[in-house]
Each structure stands twice: as structure tokens, then as C-alpha cells.
Image: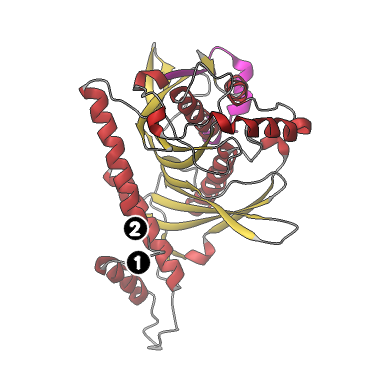
């Protein structure tokens, strides 16, 4: 049995042979480069694994170890969800290494990193700060170089563990220097139940490909979506001037331009992962907390998280980068607030900006919130993208 936090990350360091000290990280990474010869030339060279091979149970003893609570506690005596995101990210990596474990090797030649947080669905909206938490999870689908891991979080209360959330992460395997893709063990479902889970993984992959193909960054909105945008435009026209440029904000509404919140992080070595890039869980925590603060400011009360979906990790974040985070309320409906957080890094020496992540969060307020209104075409596309993500959350 493993504990989250430092024990879990120490286990990962042992698996890859990573340094625990920043001062000698370069030597450790140079030593990892020599493991390239241990990589499989094709997936057929690797033995198939079952879902049981990667099953893990990890505990967060908030109830039985009060001194641990400080790290997870909010001012309002609830659990910081950003910390939970960090733990889920570490667990997904460890599950993937359990699937690819080779007892003949002292260290794994694979660099396994998070590619996508496909979905996190909340089943219980209160996480108690004084009750033990249990995470379970295993690999549910495998491609040639990618791995889908599903995790479940439950909390011990009133004599039993009750479900809190379900999470699906997609991981990718790369060579020891994290430069090119590497093959992973195939997954062989054992019995009809595992076969059904595997087929769900196949369906998830097809859905992701379909959504990527239909992205508003690639193709025009649908006829229905174009009508939505035009309706929003007509509702903001100033009827007195009869001008395309004269716009008036409708009652109980907010211009999208006025629903932003930004932040900056300096990427210090303390927040590095086992491959000496910035830990993906840290990025998720910072993005979530900024998105939550924006939703809180917009709705005028403390919102609760409904779902996280489609967090795409486009580029790794290097130590020493300046990380810019920008959150935008992009869609509202009733009590719901859809927030998009965009992160990019600035290399201080080259002055180049690069997008690293895009995050999508669905929050719920305890009252109806103002309508968000786009003004420009670009904002209208953000609105439609937010609407798509919200509809996926509601439909699932």
C-alpha cells in the first residue's frame, strides 16, 4: 500500500532513478540517457499485461493523521481540490509504470508523462478535511505508446467509503530523455468485464479524435452554433442607432472582456517532476485555483466544482520559465459557470511565448449568475467552445 504525497513521488523516483536534489539533476538525467538501449523495438517485443497488473490502492490519511491536514486545508475548513489534482496526476503516472513494469530491469527506461486529463466527474461535492481518503485505479486502455488510466476517489465517513470522484487520464510513454515516443506493453482484457472497460477506452479515443477534428480552431461553427452567435449579436444591438458597431449590454449580463483573471508563476526547481520539468499536478492546481477564483468573483459566492475535462498538455514547462495563466468565464447557464484557463510560458532570454496547457472547468453557484456576452468574433468562438464543454459535462 502506498501513501500519496512524498512517499508516492519517492516511489516514482526509485522507478526511473531520478535525483532527489536539484544540484545533481544533470548527472542523473545523463545517466538516464544510457537506458535507451533497453527500449523495445516494437510493441510485439513486450509481454501483454492485464488490468490487474496495474491496479493500485493509495491512501491519504487526513482523518488518522491530523498533522497532514494543514497542506490540504482551505480557510473554510474544506479540502483544497488543487492538491487532489496533484495526487491524481502522480497516481496516474505510477499506475502507468505498474503496467509497464519489467522485473528484469532495475530502472524503467520509459519517461511517462501526462498528455491529457480526459475527464474528472464529481460524485460528491463535499470533501471532508478530517476523514481518510482512498484512491484506486488501473490501466483501462492502451495504444502503441499511450495509456489510459482510470481512477476513483472515495472518502471514509459513517463507517464506510463513499465515492467522491471518477477521473480518466491519458499518459504517453517516451524515451529516457523525453524526446521521442516509446512503446508500451499491450493490454489483454481478462474476461467480459475487462473487455467492456477496454471497449469504453476505444470509444473514448474515437471521441477525442472526433472532437479534435471538429475544433473551432480548425472548422467553422455548425449552423445551429451560427444562429446562437447571431442571436447574441442581435440582443446587444442599440436599436436607437441602427448601427452594427453600437452595442449595448443587456440586463443581468457581463461582457466577456470583463470576466478575466490573470496570474503569473515563476517556475522554481521545488515544483519539478521526476524528469526535471514542472510537475503537471502543480500546473493543474494553479490553473484550478485561478479558475475557481474567477468563478467566485463572477458569481459572487463560493462555487463548487462540477467537472474538469479536456486538459491538454501541449508542451512541457521548463524550470526557470515565467508561466502566465489567464482564466476566462466563457459560458454561463443558470447557476453554472464554464471557465477556460490558458497557460503559456515566456522564455526570459528569447522572449518567446508558447502555449503549454488549456484547462476547462465547470463550476456551479448557489444562485443564478449573470449571462456572459461575447463582443468580438474571437470571443464568440470562445463562447461556443465553452458551450460545447458544458454540454458534454451535462450529457455525461
Cβ–Cβ under 8 Å for marks 1 and 2: yes
Name the residue at 55% across, 22% down.
4
Type of colouring:
secondary structure
Q: Earlier in the sequence, mark 1 or mark 2?
A: 2
**Does 35 appear in magenta?**
no
Which residue is most to the right? Answer: 23
Q: Is residue 64 left or right of residue 95?
A: right
Specify the segment rendered in magenta.
55-82
Above or below, 164 relative to 248: above
Which residue is most to the left? Answer: 192
Question: Which image quarter: residue 231?
Answer: bottom left
**Does 63 appear in magenta?**
yes
Real-space Cα separation, disc 1 to disc 2, in angstroms: 8 Å
Q: Name the residue that disc number 1 marks.
A: 219
Q: Name the residue that disc number 2 marks.
A: 213
| Dot 1 crowding, Cα within 10 Å, few <14, some 14–19, many 20+ | few
Name the residue at 44% across, 79% down.
247
Residue toward you, 106 or 241? 106
Q: In the rendered image, is residue 302 in sight?
A: yes
Residue toward you, 165 or 158? 165
Quarter placement of the C terminus: top left
Name the residue at 39% across, 19% down.
53
Element at label 1: loop
| Dot 2 crowding, Cα within 10 Å, few <14, some 14–19, many 20+ | few
Residue toward you, 13 or 82? 13
Q: Position of residue 346 (x, y in %)?
A: 67, 56
Q: Position of residue 185 (x, y in %)?
A: 41, 28
State the mark number for residue 171: none
Amino acid at each position: 500500500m502506498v501513501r500519496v504525497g512524498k512517499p508516492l513521488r519517492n516511489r516514482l523516483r526509485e522507478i526511473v532513478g531520478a535525483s532527489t536534489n536539484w544540484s545533481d539533476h544533470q548527472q542523473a538525467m545523463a545517466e538516464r540517457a544510457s537506458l535507451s538501449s533497453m527500449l523495445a523495438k516494437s510493441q510485439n517485443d513486450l509481454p501483454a499485461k492485464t488490468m490487474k497488473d496495474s491496479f493500485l490502492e493509495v491512501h491519504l490519511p487526513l482523518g488518522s493523521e491530523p498533522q497532514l491536514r494543514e497542506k490540504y486545508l482551505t480557510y473554510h475548513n474544506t479540502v483544497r481540490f488543487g492538491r487532489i489534482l496533484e495526487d491524481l496526476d502522480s497516481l496516474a503516472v505510477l499506475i502507468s509504470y505498474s503496467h509497464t513494469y519489467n522485473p528484469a530491469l532495475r530502472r524503467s527506461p520509459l519517461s511517462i508523462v501526462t498528455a491529457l486529463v480526459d475527464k474528472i466527474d464529481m460524485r460528491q461535492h463535499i470533501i471532508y478535511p478530517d476523514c481518510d481518503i482512498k484512491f484506486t485505479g488501473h490501466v483501462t486502455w492502451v495504444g502503441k505508446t499511450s495509456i489510459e488510466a482510470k481512477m476513483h476517489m472515495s472518502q471514509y465517513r459513517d463507517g464506510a467509503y463513499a465515492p467522491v470522484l471518477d477521473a480518466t487520464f491519458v499518459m504517453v510513454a517516451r524515451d529516457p530523455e523525453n524526446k521521442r515516443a516509446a512503446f508500451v506493453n499491450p493490454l489483454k482484457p481478462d474476461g467480459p468485464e475487462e473487455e467492456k472497460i477496454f471497449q469504453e477506452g476505444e470509444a473514448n479515443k474515437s471521441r477525442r479524435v472526433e472532437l479534435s477534428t471538429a475544433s473551432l480552431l480548425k472548422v467553422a461553427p455548425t449552423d445551429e452554433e451560427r444562429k446562437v452567435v447571431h442571436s447574441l449579436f442581435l440582443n446587444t444591438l442599440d436599436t436607437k442607432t441602427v448601427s452594427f458597431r453600437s452595442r449595448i449590454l443587456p440586463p443581468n449580463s457581463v461582457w466577456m472582456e470583463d470576466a478575466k483573471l490573470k496570474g503569473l508563476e515563476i517556475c522554481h526547481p521545488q515544483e519539478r517532476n521526476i524528469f526535471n520539468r514542472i510537475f503537471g499536478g502543480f500546473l493543474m492546481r494553479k490553473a484550478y485555483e485561478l479558475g475557481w477564483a474567477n468563478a467566485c468573483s463572477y458569481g459572487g459566492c463560493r462555487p463548487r466544482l462540477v467537472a474538469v475535462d479536456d486538459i491538454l498538455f501541449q508542451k512541457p514547462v521548463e524550470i526557470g520559465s515565467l508561466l502566465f495563466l489567464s482564466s476566462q468565464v466563457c459560458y454561463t447557464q443558470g447557476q453554472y459557470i464554464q471557465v477556460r484557463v490558458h497557460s503559456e510560458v515566456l522564455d526570459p532570454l528569447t522572449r518567446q511565448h508558447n502555449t503549454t496547457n488549456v484547462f476547462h472547468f465547470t463550476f456551479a453557484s448557489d444562485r443564478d449568475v449573470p449571462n456572459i456576452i461575447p463582443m468580438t468574433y474571437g470571443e464568440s468562438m470562445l463562447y461556443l467552445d465553452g458551450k460545447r464543454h458544458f454540454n458534454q459535462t451535462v450529457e455525461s
